[in-house]
Amino acid sequence: MTATDFIVARDDFETCQTIATTLPEIDTLPQDALLVKVDRFALTANNITYAVLGDALKYWQLFPAPAGFGNIPVWGFGDVIASKHPNVPVGERLFGYFPMATHLVIEAADVSKRGLRDGAAHRQGVAPVYNAYARVSGDPAYAGKQGDYQALLRPLFMLSFLVDDFLTENDDFGARRVLLSSASSKTAFGLGHLLHTRGRKVIGLTSAGNTGFATSLGCYDEIVTYDRVTSLPSETPVAFIDMAGNSALRTELHRHFRDQMKCSVRVGLTHRATEPDEGELPGAKPRWFSAPDTIRKRAKEWGPGGIEQRFGPAWSGFAPMLERCLSVVESRGPEAVQRVYLDTLKGRIPPEQGHMLSLLG
């Protein structure tokens, strides 16, 4: 039995291909292992960030690939087609972190009614959320279009939620406005929604071509194109949440606001235009936001289930806007996956589209 994997060159993301891999025979699988057919997965600009940070954050080690190549992790759904675990039946549907592939072997551990964990040795050393799978068979929240929204946006909105929690805990660092770059990106408008909900003034920074979409979201008090960022009043204290990862933009904003730049947090790399050494900038020193560190901190402070208890209502308040601002596009087969991947890599996906893919024909 063979599987199909979509892999990319780790030193040149435009070099990509599909390869055939041999699946192990069922009787040779490790004890408690599951063979899962990957049914469908979401692909967004955030997955490109996973690739950019593949070495630094160990994303490449999750799903092994031939030397020099990597398999980019994606969020999606899989169905158990063979099981050696007594409490996980064939036909079980799982939601979680998958490779861009048709199949995955999971070494099931910590199995409960709600989920399980992949205990494979090579997958350890990353944040626990990346090895967790929800058991979603028959759950309407993970079926149909609602399921697509979960795959496309739930992991990104969790990031939005954690950044908002970080800002809230620090009283927004005294900022009176919050600037979000790449305002049309899914993580940005999720954060914009949360900030807007708690009454913060939110400025969305975007390209001219995405101004209409960003405006339509209704979560930004003002939309400013990148070529006009210095028109913003420089005497107002601001926090900058950087989804774009563009060194030139970050430098321009810091030099414009100087000491009024109270917080500068790097979250995403949608533009992938960061210089390795930017030098010192006026105002708050730019820092990377670590979602895994924040999750560990809050899990300790809030106790078991505390994050989900708070995240659930936030997601419920955010989900209704997806019906009006996001169109789900489904594509199947290796050629379609490669096309959408390259369009995503090169920034050619319209912001109002969310792409669900499958390597299965």
Image (cartoon, rainbow, N blue to C red):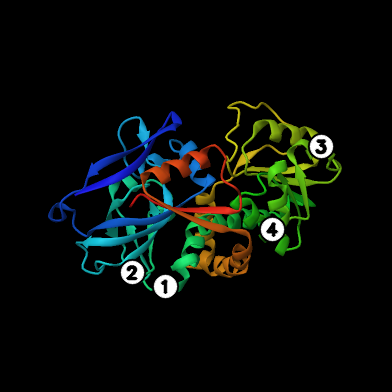
x and y percentages locating residue 116 in the rendered image: 34, 62
Look at the numbered disc 1 and give the secondary structure of its residue. Answer: loop
Left or right: residue 338 versus residue 268 is left
The image quadrant that residue 246 belongs to is: top right
Q: Amino acid at mark 1?
A: Asp
On screen, 317 above or below 330? below
**On the image, numbered disc 3 is attached to which residue?**
230
Look at the numbered disc 4 and give the secondary structure of its residue. Answer: loop
Q: Amino acid at mark 3?
A: Thr
Mark nearest the camera among 4 and 2 is 4
Q: Is residue 80 visible?
A: yes
Left or right: residue 239 versus residue 112 is right
Left or right: residue 131 versus residue 218 is left
Checking the image for residue 139, the label placed there is: 1
- Precedes in sequence: disc 1 or disc 4: 1
- Precedes in sequence: disc 2 or disc 3: 2
Q: Amino acid at mark 2?
A: Ser
